Amino acid sequence: MTDAEWAAVRPGDARGLSRLGRAYAFFRRWREQGLITEFHDRMRGKVREREGREAEPAAGIIDAQSVRAAATLPAASRGCDGGKKVPGRKRHIVTDTLGLLLVIRSPPRTPATGTPRQDC
């Protein structure tokens, strides 16, 4: 979850708010120390072993997706996929052969050169 997603969580009672703050403190600390990635990698290895595979994948599948950007994002952080005519951002993912996520990257938008496209 992102910081904004954590902020949007509305607990039902005052005690829930303190528990939420404590949970977020753990999450933030784990994220800063790289433990979220560590937990993800370990869980992926367990799932692969349960499926009768080696814990570490030997092959990956690469894909790029165009993701529509929210209207609230500044225009400078969005681009346009001219082939699909989708205004937004590009997201690159690598999965193993079971479809389990290995890597996800959303590269920063590069500055436009020349005349901007009008068809997005």
Image: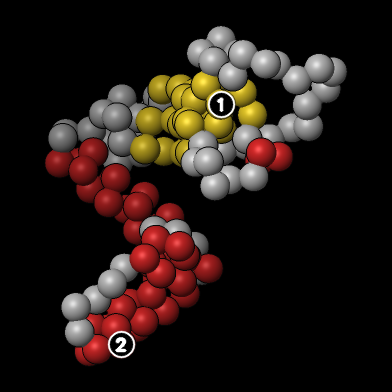
Asked if 23 appears above or below 37 in the picture, the reply is below
Q: Is residue 108 visible?
A: no
Q: Mark 1 highlights which residue?
A: 87
Q: Residue at x 36, y 65 (%)?
A: 8
Q: Residue at x 26, y 29 (%)?
A: 98
Residue furthest right as drawn: 114
Gap between marks 2 and 1 measured at Cα: 40 Å
Q: Is residue 8 visible?
A: yes
Q: Nearer the viewer, residue 110 or 119?
A: 119
Q: Residue at x 35, y 58 (%)?
A: 39
Q: Position of residue 44 (x, y in %)?
A: 29, 45
Q: Position of residue 20 (x, y in %)?
A: 31, 78
Asked if 89 appears above or below 1 in the picture, the reply is above
Of tags 2 and 1, the one toward the viewer is 1
Q: Mark 2 highlights which residue?
A: 18
Neighbourhood count class around disc 1 (C-alpha, 10 Å): few under 14, some 14–19, many 20 upward: many
User: SS class of the residue under badge 2?
Assistant: helix
User: SS class of the residue under badge 1?
Assistant: strand
Hey, what amino acid is under mark 2?
Answer: Ser
- Quadrant of the image occupied by residue 38: bottom left
